[in-house]
């Protein structure tokens, strides 16, 4: 799987999350009668994805070392959103990469787990002039 | 398998909700403490779903089921009547999370929600008609809202109201109720089959591969189509084909209009209204219970309907023109501008003389059986505000 030009060799899990803020308002009683709460729903937020994958030298198409792969992925946070094209499976848009984290353990010499927390900006709803 | 309005959830594996009530305890020197209870909050919590392609009642694939769940936070809770075990009411979803592990044959989803008890909250509309613009004086300023004929107790501020007429859709009957230019609330009671009303004649969007799109995130392209089980426009690269549902003959192909589509997405996607935005070309909208399509476009000098059969002229009232096809269907084009004029021949109804540097709104549709074209066009023009809401019993 690629985000822009950056490759993540193995994808283990993707978690999608959509969210809308909801407020519960408790009006004061009127004419001695209690009023049930009023629920107000606001505008939805941009969809969030949590992508969990693994870095691996053998499976990387350019055989980049784990260090090089980690460096590339960290660089995603600094990229322009339009550079982070994302066309994996049914996704077709761009990613705003908010956080990148790596799990370090004894298996680091072979695989390195990575988690990316991103906002998914589907095309053509967002950046319609930048088709992925 | 559980229906939440028009969305089928294969399995609900857990329901974890609670009602909280703040309590204030006041301690006095010489008396026992006094406890004051505040109004209880709405029941809230989370449900866990398992999505599966084998048991889905519409045989939707994961892509569709995931999109359905992800669309729930952006849809109004009135679209989700829900009945399971002892719970009956509506759910308002604020967060939906779906976990996708490619190796698994199911998908797990969790939604955080508030539960609006049937005994406390009732579905309703806030409605206020208003003219689309001042190009035409189409009075009286009234419009209609479609409600399934299975409901009861339809009321506004004046009391019980009756529908102006009804329409037959592929899913069942919808009654059309009037509202005028004074803001009002129209309420109704769902039947014992609590969820079915949100599956009758609702607006739906599909890709060229017949995959349902529930959200406003998925891209659409040529071959995608809208349906409200009454009118069905299919958006192609050179024209938009239009079909109409007839209760005796099923879906009938009418012909096409000269609106050519490319890439796009749904900017609005609700049970009562879907608007699709084709970037670099036009927008199209359909409404529940109305056999009409609204087009918003620029860059065109004409809007033209080409029929599959022979047309005969009915009338031209300036803001709309109507023709009849061989099946006896009255087909119209209505405009919201004084620009342009109508013409017709045996196979075309045309609005021409438009300025390709300006934006236009045009309605194309078919007169429902139990009303008049003039009245139906006026109702479309004066639609204005219609919002779904709950009222407290």
Image (cartoon, coloured by chain):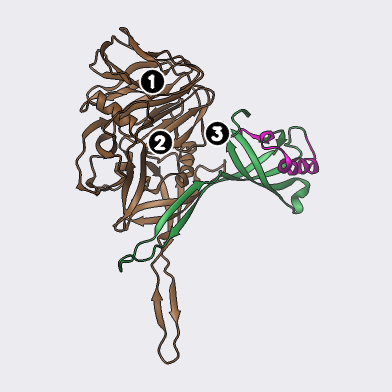
| Magenta range | A63-87
Residue drawn 30% across the image and 33% down it: B289
Q: Is mark 1 on a helix, strand or loop?
A: loop
Horizontal and vertical percent position of residue B214 = 44, 37
Q: Is mark 3 on a helix, strand or loop?
A: loop
Q: Mark 2 points at which residue?
A: B59
- Indicate left or right for A67 with B251 as reference: right
Q: Name the residue under label 1.
A: B338
Using the rendered view, name the quadrant where residue B127 is placed: top left
Chain identifier for the brown-coloured part of the image? B
Task: For marks 1 and 3, give the CA distance.
Answer: 32 Å
- Indicate left or right for B188 with B385 as reference: left
* Chain letter of the residue carrying label 1: B
Crowd around label 3: few <14 · some 14–19 · many ≥20 (10 Å)? some
- Indicate left or right for B48 with B148 as reference: right
Residue B130 counted in the magenta span: no
In this rendering, do the residues under marks 1 and 2 share a single chain?
yes
Q: Earlier in the sequence, mark 1 or mark 2?
A: 2
* On-image quarter of the C terminus of chain B: bottom left
Chain identifier for the green-coloured part of the image? A
* Chain letter of the residue carrying label 3: A
In this rendering, do the residues under marks 3 and 2 share a single chain?
no
As displayed, is residue A6 above or below residue B97?
above
Q: Name the residue under label 3.
A: A125
């Amino acid at each position: 799987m690629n985000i822009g030009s950056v490759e993540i060799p193995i994808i283990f899990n993707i978690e999608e999350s959509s969210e809308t803020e909801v407020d519960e308002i408790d009006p004061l009683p009127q004419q001695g009668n209690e009023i049930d709460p009023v629920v107000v729903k606001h505008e939805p937020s941009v969809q969030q994805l949590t992508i969990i994958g693994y870095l691996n030298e053998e499976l990387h198409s350019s055989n980049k070392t784990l260090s090089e792969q980690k460096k590339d992925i960290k660089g995603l946070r600094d990229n322009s959103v339009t550079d982070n094209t994302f066309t994996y499976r049914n996704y077709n848009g761009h990613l705003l990469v908010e956080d990148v984290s790596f799990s370090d353990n004894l298996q680091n010499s072979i695989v390195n787990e990575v988690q990316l927390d991103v906002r998914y900006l589907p095309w053509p709803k967002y950046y319609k002039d930048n088709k992925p | 398998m559980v229906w939440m309005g028009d969305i089928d959830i294969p399995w609900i594996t857990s329901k974890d909700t609670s009602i909280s009530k703040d309590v204030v305890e006041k301690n006095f020197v010489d008396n026992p403490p006094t406890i004051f209870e505040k109004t209880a909050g709405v029941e809230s919590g989370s449900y866990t779903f398992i999505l599966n392609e084998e048991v889905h009642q519409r045989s939707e694939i994961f892509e569709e089921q995931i999109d359905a769940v992800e669309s729930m936070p952006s849809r109004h809770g009135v679209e989700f009547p829900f009945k399971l075990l002892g719970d009956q009411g509506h759910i308002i979803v604020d967060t939906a999370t779906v976990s996708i592990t490619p190796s698994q044959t199911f998908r797990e989803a969790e939604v955080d929600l508030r539960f609006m008890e049937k005994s406390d909250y009732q579905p309703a509309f806030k409605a206020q008609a208003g003219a689309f613009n001042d190009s035409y004086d189409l009075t009286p300023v009234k419009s209609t809202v479609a409600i399934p004929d299975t409901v009861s107790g339809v009321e506004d501020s004046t009391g019980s109201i009756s529908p102006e007429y009804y329409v037959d859709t592929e899913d069942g009957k919808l009654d059309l109720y009037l509202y005028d230019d004074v803001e009002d609330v129209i309420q109704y009671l769902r039947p014992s089959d609590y969820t079915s009303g949100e599956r009758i004649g609702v607006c739906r969007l599909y890709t060229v591969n017949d995959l349902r799109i529930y959200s406003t995130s998925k891209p659409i392209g040529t071959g995608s189509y809208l349906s409200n089980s009454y009118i069905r426009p299919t958006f192609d690269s050179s024209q938009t084909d239009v079909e109409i549902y007839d209760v005796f003959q099923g879906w009938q192909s009418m012909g096409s209009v000269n609106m050519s589509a490319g890439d796009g997405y749904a900017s609005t996607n609700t049970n009562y209204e879907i608007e699709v935005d084709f970037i670099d070309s036009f927008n199209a909208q359909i409404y529940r219970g109305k056999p009409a399509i609204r087009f918003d476009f620029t860059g065109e000098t004409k809007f033209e309907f080409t029929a599959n059969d022979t047309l005969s002229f009915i009338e031209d009232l300036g803001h709309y023109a109507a023709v009849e096809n061989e099946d006896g269907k009255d087909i119209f084009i209505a405009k919201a501008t004084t620009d342009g004029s109508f013409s017709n021949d045996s196979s075309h109804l045309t609005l021409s003389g438009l300025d390709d540097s300006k934006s236009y709104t045009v309605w194309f549709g078919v007169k429902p059986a139990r009303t008049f074209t003039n009245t139906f066009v006026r109702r479309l023009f004066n639609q204005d505000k219609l919002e779904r809401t709950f009222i407290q019993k």
